[in-house]
Image: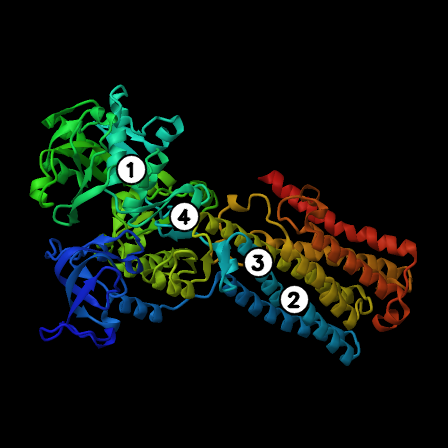
């Protein structure tokens, strides 16, 4: 509406001050202040992440600085009107709207390099310096001994090549790609390859509540009559005959009340039930999530909505309003012999009312006790309100239910005429329940040294209850968006180490939480499904979007997409990420320790007065073939025992940490000394095949090293030789290729080798196992020291 006239214009032409008409099913075109509102509800999941429609009104704010989810007199661009109608004055358009503000944040957020990228960059610099030093040392030593300068230069270059694990980039890429493939089988789609490894370093998982920790499906869990609480799950398990119990005078009073409660919840319901035979065994509902949960629970207890409506057709209703916070429907009674025992006896019409409990008590004068109506005393009122408070403290959404017999149909469905002198029946409690597998996944996280944190736009009480039930926070303390907004960056950094639950948060708050955790040195995984989550998803070390409920914006921003929207899938992906990082470390451990062995041979031989122990081509063969094939096979090594029972690697931890540097030094030295010692003995003994024996011993030592480093702690005999068939095949293939180099004539000419007699081959083979047994001894000592 512009200049007092209603016009249809493009949303991009709206300006502040225009008045927009809002109707059910329409998209809100701009941010605006409501000036007129009739039963208006909007779905603001794009901004808050909560799918439950929000009731709106046009009253002024009662508190300043309310979080977005509590600004009931405002509507926002990109949200959907699900019910009612209204008028709103446009306050912001385009990039100045809440949605535009989110888009602006996304553009300004910068990503940090992953832990693996930082570690490999450090490794690359170190190896480059080492390679240059090796070239200089080998070349200088050769010249001092009077060796041919050209040969020594080639040898130095070969040694520099040997010092650098050329296969590392390929191995990392292959390991990440294979890991992404395995994660896909676990219902996690990797969009950005480095995310595969980063998952293994995660120290904090910030998770949305709705749909990730919970089922994203409102479910009736509790029925309360006369202060006596019954769990729906218990009623179903025990087979309590609730169906039509309210019509049977001889039935126990509590069961009669439950029957009446469920009947009322079914009849004043606008949701549509999809029956079990059409959905493969489970009832589903179409319509408002709250009402849908009621018809599903009623169906599970035997009350099918379609059959009830045939016997008790709706003839009038008083619609819901946000001022009254209740609605009433009037039904024609089923005139049958059963009706003589019904709570309304022979009344031809019955009014059923639902709404907020405190408002319901204002219009009720009696309470149904199960076999009769009794006056609503102060004691009963206190009992009902106490039950309401108890359920609300547990995060339940609570509805009160009442009825009133009518001797005739009112001329007009006027609230003042219908909603009076009602009989209170009981309370219905419902909640979006936790996923059954998430509690175990949360415990697995804690065992693995990972902090699960809940960040939600939902109410603090609901967030606290779910957090306690899942074991995320023992005390259930929740910090709200309003409290976060008043904190400085320094205060945020302190508080994020203590709080596990955040409620009523905005996109800026989520971003600040992630930044504060990163400032404290954490590697953060962040889940989200809405447009509002995109800035935090981009800033987090791992952004995780929801595949089912997620928006396109969140999926495009994220590094990983959960195809089943399940928190437990993140935990499985973390385990896979740890395995991949472990395997990359095993490759580095294997190749660099093998390369160090070659370097020791080349550096120590001149001091023993020996000729050049290995020729340049032999060095390249060992480095490219012997290192390459088993190294690639290490990328498919299965997860080690206890992978999720140890803390994650510290973000600043060197890739040589946790004993890898120590193993490289002593393992390489052992390999070099065994090979050189055998070669020195054969050379002094005047054997013509001494160089081939040294070459063979060094090659086979590396095969033993590859088999032994498969586990950092367990013996090869514990994990099984066949548990990595690819590595076993690579070792056998490498052995075969080396035998070809030793025994095939044209390869002998190329590599300057000679055929080894069986005795010499057995000597080389026996001595090469020293490295394998040495590594096994190291692991045995580690196991027994712990």
Q: Which residue carries the number 2 mark?
A: 167
Tell which circle, 3 or 2, labels the residue nearer the N-terminal end: 2
Mark 3 or 4, closer to the camera: 3
Residue under the image location 67 percent in, 61 percent down: 632
Give the residue drawn at x 12%, y 56%: 61
Between the C-alphas of marks 2 and 4, the distance is 35 Å
Residue 656 seen in the current view:
no
Q: Left of 18 or right of it: where is 644?
A: right
- Which mark, by number, is residue 308? 1
Eye-nearest disc, 4 or 1: 1
Measuring 38% from the left and 62% from the top, which residue is drawn there? 554
Q: Nearer the viewer, residue 736 or 127?
A: 736
Quadrant in the rendering for residue 414: top left
**Mark 4 touches mark 1? (CB < 8 Å):** no
Local SS, label 4: strand
Give how far across and how far down residue 665 sits, in percent.
Answer: 65, 57
What residue does disc 4 label?
451
* Alpha carbon distance from label 4 to label 1: 49 Å
Residue most extreme to the left: 416
Question: Which mark lies nearer to you, 3 or 1?
Answer: 1
Disc 3 from disc 4: Cα separation:
26 Å
Of pointers 3 and 4, the one earlier in the residue sequence: 3
**Would you say the residues marked 3 and 4 are in contact, meaning their CB atoms lie under 8 Å apart?**
no
Label 2: element kind: loop
Q: Are marks 2 and 4 in contact (CB under 8 Å)?
A: no
Q: Are marks 2 and 1 in contact (CB under 8 Å)?
A: no
- Tell me the distance, in whole angstroms, between the alpha carbons under discs 2 and 1: 71 Å
How dense is the environment of label 3, judged by Cα within 10 Å: few (below 14), some, or many (20 and up)? some
* Circle on res. 181: 3
- In the depicted structure, whether residue 635 falls above or below residue 384: below
Q: Secondary structure at mark 1?
A: helix
Looking at the image, which is closer to me, 98 or 722?
98
């Amino acid at each position: 509406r512009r200049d007092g006239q209603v016009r249809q214009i493009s949303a991009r032409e709206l300006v502040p001050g225009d008045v927009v008409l809002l109707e059910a099913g329409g998209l809100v075109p701009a941010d605006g202040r409501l000036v007129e509102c009739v039963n208006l509800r909007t779905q603001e999941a794009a901004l808050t992440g909560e799918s439950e429609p929000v009731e709106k009104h046009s009253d002024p704010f009662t508190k300043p600085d309310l979080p977005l989810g509590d600004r009931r007199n405002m509507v926002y661009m990109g949200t959907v009107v699900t019910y009612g109608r209204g008028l709103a004055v446009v306050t912001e358009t385009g990039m100045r709207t809440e949605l535009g503000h989110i888009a602006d944040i996304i553009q300004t957020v910068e990503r940090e390099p992953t832990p693996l990228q930082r570690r490999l960059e450090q490794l690359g610099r170190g190896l480059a310096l080492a390679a240059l030093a090796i070239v200089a040392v080998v070349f200088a030593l050769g010249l001092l001994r009077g060796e041919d300068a050209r040969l020594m230069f080639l040898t130095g270059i070969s040694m520099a090549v040997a010092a650098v694990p050329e296969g590392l980039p390929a191995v990392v890429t292959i390991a990440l790609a294979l890991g992404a493939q395995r994660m896909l089988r676990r219902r996690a789609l990797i969009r950005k390859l480095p995310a595969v490894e980063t998952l293994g370093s995660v120290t904090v998982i910030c998770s949305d509540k709705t749909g990730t920790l919970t089922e994203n499906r409102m479910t009736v869990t509790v029925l309360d009559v006369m202060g006596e609480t019954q769990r729906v799950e218990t009623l179903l398990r025990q087979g309590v005959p609730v169906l039509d119990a309210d019509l049977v005078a001889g039935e126990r009073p509590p069961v009669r009340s439950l029957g009446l409660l469920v009947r009322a919840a079914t009849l004043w319901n606008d949701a549509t039930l999809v029956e079990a035979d059409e959905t493969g065994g489970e009832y589903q509902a179409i319509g408002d999530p709250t009402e849908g949960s009621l018809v599903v629970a009623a169906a599970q207890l035997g009350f099918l909505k379609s059959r009830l409506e045939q016997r008790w057709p709706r003839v009038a209703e008083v619609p819901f309003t946000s001022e009254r916070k209740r609605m009433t429907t009037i039904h024609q009674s089923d005139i049958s012999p059963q009706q003589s025992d019904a709570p309304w006896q022979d009344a031809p019409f019955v009014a059923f009312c639902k709404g907020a409990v405190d408002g319901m008590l204002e219009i009720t004068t009696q309470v149904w006790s199960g076999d009769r109506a009794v006056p609503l005393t102060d004691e009963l009122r206190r009992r009902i309100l106490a039950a309401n408070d108890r359920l609300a403290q547990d995060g339940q959404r609570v509805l009160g239910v009442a009825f009133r017999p009518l001797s005739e149909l009112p001329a007009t469905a006027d609230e003042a005429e219908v909603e009076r002198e009602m009989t209170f029946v009981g309370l219905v409690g419902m909640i979006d329940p936790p996923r059954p597998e998430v509690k175990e996944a949360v415990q697995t996280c804690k065992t693995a040294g990972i902090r699960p944190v809940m960040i939600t736009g939902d109410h603090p009480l609901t967030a606290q209850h779910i957090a306690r039930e899942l074991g995320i926070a023992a005390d259930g303390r929740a910090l709200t968006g309003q409290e976060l907004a008043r904190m400085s960056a320094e205060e945020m950094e302190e508080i994020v180490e203590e709080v596990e639950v955040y409620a009523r948060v905005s996109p800026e708050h989520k971003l600040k939480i992630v930044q504060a955790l990163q400032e404290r040195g954490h590697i953060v995984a962040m889940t989200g499904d809405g447009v509002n989550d995109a800035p935090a998803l981009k800033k987090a070390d791992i952004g995780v979007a929801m595949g089912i409920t997620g928006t396109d914006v969140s999926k495009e921003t994220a590094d990983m997409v959960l195809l089943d929207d399940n928190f437990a899938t993140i935990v499985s992906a973390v385990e896979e990420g740890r395995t991949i990082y472990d395997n990359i470390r095993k490759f580095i451990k294997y190749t660099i320790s093998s390369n160090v062995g070659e370097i020791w041979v080349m550096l120590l031989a001149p001091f023993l007065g020996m000729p050049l122990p290995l020729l340049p081509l032999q060095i390249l063969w060992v480095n490219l073939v012997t290192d390459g094939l088993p190294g690639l096979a290490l990328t498919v090594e299965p997860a080690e025992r206890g992978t999720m029972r140890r803390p994650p690697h510290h973000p600043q931890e060197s890739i040589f940490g946790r004993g890898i540097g120590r193993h490289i030094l002593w393992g390489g030295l052992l390999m070099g000394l065994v090979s050189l010692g055998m070669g020195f003995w054969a050379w002094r003994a005047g054997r013509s095949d001494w160089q081939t024996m040294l070459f063979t011993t060094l090659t086979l030592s590396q095969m033993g090293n590859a088999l032994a480093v498969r586990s950092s702690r367990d013996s090869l005999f514990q994990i099984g030789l066949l548990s990595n068939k690819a590595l076993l095949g690579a070792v056998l293939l490498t052995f075969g290729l080396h035998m070809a180099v030793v025994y095939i004539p044209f390869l002998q000419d190329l590599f300057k080798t000679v055929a080894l007699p069986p005795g010499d081959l057995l000597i080389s083979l026996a001595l090469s196992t020293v490295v394998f047994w040495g590594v096994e001894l190291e692991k045995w000592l580690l196991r027994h020291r712990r």
